[in-house]
Each structure stands twice: as C-alpha cells, then as structure tokens.
Amino acid sequence: MHGHILQLCVIQAVASFIHLEPKNATVIRGSEAHFNCSTDESWDVMTWLLGGRTVLTISVEHGPLGRDEHVSAVNHSISSLSMWELFLMNASFNPIVQEVICELLPTRLGRPSSALFVQEKGNVRILESDLSVQEGMLVTFHCQASGWYPDPSVSWVVSGTTVDRGDYNTSSLQDPKGLFSSTSVLQIKVETSSTVECWASVSAAVAHQSSSVKLTVVHRIAAEEGFWLLPLSGLFDAK
C-alpha cells in the first residue's frame, strides 16, 4: 500500500513542470527580448528576475503589478496550462551573460533560468579616402571597427567578391567598458578600378555595418606622359 502511494507521488512529481523558454537569447542593445514561463502547477505569484533583480511581479488574480515602461507581459494561459510571456524592451548592454529567472510562489519545483546575452553594434570605417593609382601597384587599406561587443567579425569585399581571410590581418583590443575595437589591414595589387568595402558584424545583428572607398586605376602610359586621351566624340565636336 505504501509502495503504491510512493509510486503515485513520483508520477505526479514527474508530470508537474515549470518551463522557461528560450534557454538562451542573444539580442542587440536597444532591441527586444522575450521569454515564456509555463507551468501546470497552481501558483499565487510569478516573479521575473534579471541578473538577480526583480523586474516584474505577476499576481494570478490581478495580473502584472506595477508599471515599468521597459517591461511588459502577455498572458497566454489556457485552462490546463498557465503561460506568461515576458517582454524586455530596449535591452541594456552588459558585457556578461545575464540570468533570467521565473519564480513561482508557492511551488516545489525550483526556479528555471535562461541566459540573456546583449550585444553592441558599433561603427566601421576605412581610414583611406578614394584613391587613384597606377596599374600594378600594391595598395594598403586600413579598416577600423570601434565599439563592438563581442569582438566583431571583420571582412573585406572588393568589387562584390569576398576577400579570403588569409589575405588580410585583423587584431582587436578590449576597453575597460568591455567593448572591442578591431583593426584590419588589407593589401591588394591594383589591376582594375574597383570598390573596396570593409564589413563588420556580430551574430545578433540583422545586417552588417560597412564602409567603402573607390579605387581608380591610372594607366601607366598616360601617367608617365602627363596627358589624358580625350574621347573621339570630343575631337569631332570641337570647333
């Protein structure tokens, strides 16, 4: 008899749950993050914590308590399942992973947690201006990507073609605030006029940041003789 009761309690414990999803969320600073906490357990108060700080309290009878313009919640509950979705608006940058916790009172099932990773999108620029050089010359470009977190992925594109990673060098430094600045150096042999682009991005960004310059080829003969050939149409039109 006692064994049957114990088995029934174990089955009930396994059947009950608290789920917090997603387990990991990565967003850009200033964007929105959301989490769902669901349970088939009965509860009186649901508390949401971010980095150890309470950001929202929900009463089963009255709903969200208090007002915070940076936090909101939506009730998705049905008869057999209680589910609340937390919205964190305008996520703040933090160089460490922040723990998100959904806590129910009273409960016997513990506190599920998720990880929130907030990235920072900085800026990028090629230090050189538009250039006009002789065909066959070696030209060096420097790209600076500043104010990123984590360390940005930097790449070069020449006339729409991505440059192999082995053809340029990139180094990075991290400042006291945790932000990264990367410097990338590309050297190319000029063959045709082209557009040189430097791209920088982090995983949560929808699109990369870019900077570009124009590289114009001056043919060696024209450069050495010190004159330019006019289009034929210009000769016939002259009076």
Image (cartoon, helix red, strand yellow):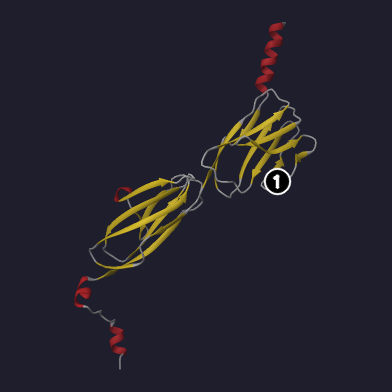
**Amino acid type of disc 1?**
Asp
Image point 64% across, 28% down: which residue? 111
Give the x, y percent position of residue 67: 73, 45
Instruction: Give the camera-side residue of 141 and 75.
Output: 141
Quadrant in which the N terminus appears: top right
**Extreme residue in the front direction:** 176
Apparent side of residue 122 relative to residue 112 in the rendered image (left or right): left
Give the x, y percent position of residue 29: 55, 48
**Extreme residue in the right direction:** 61
Position of residue 74 relative to residue 131, above or below, is above
Using the rendered view, name the quadrant where residue 226 is placed: bottom left
Q: Give the total number of marks visible in the rendering.
A: 1
Position of residue 122 relative to residue 116, above or below, is below
Apparent side of residue 172 relative to residue 220 in the rendered image (left or right): right
How many other residues sit within 10 Å of disc 1, few (<14), some (14-19) or many (≥20)?
few
Disc 1, SS: loop
Quadrant in which the C terminus appears: bottom left
Image point 65% across, 43% down: which residue? 87
Instruction: Give the camera-side residue of 46 and 13.
Output: 46
**Extreme residue in the bottom direction:** 239
Using the rendered view, name the quadrant where residue 94 is placed: top right
Q: Which residue is mark 1?
A: 68
Give the x, y percent position of residue 71: 67, 44
Apparent side of residue 149 relative to residue 107 in the rendered image (left or right): left
Image point 29% across, 51% down: which residue? 167
Give the x, y percent position of residue 143: 37, 56
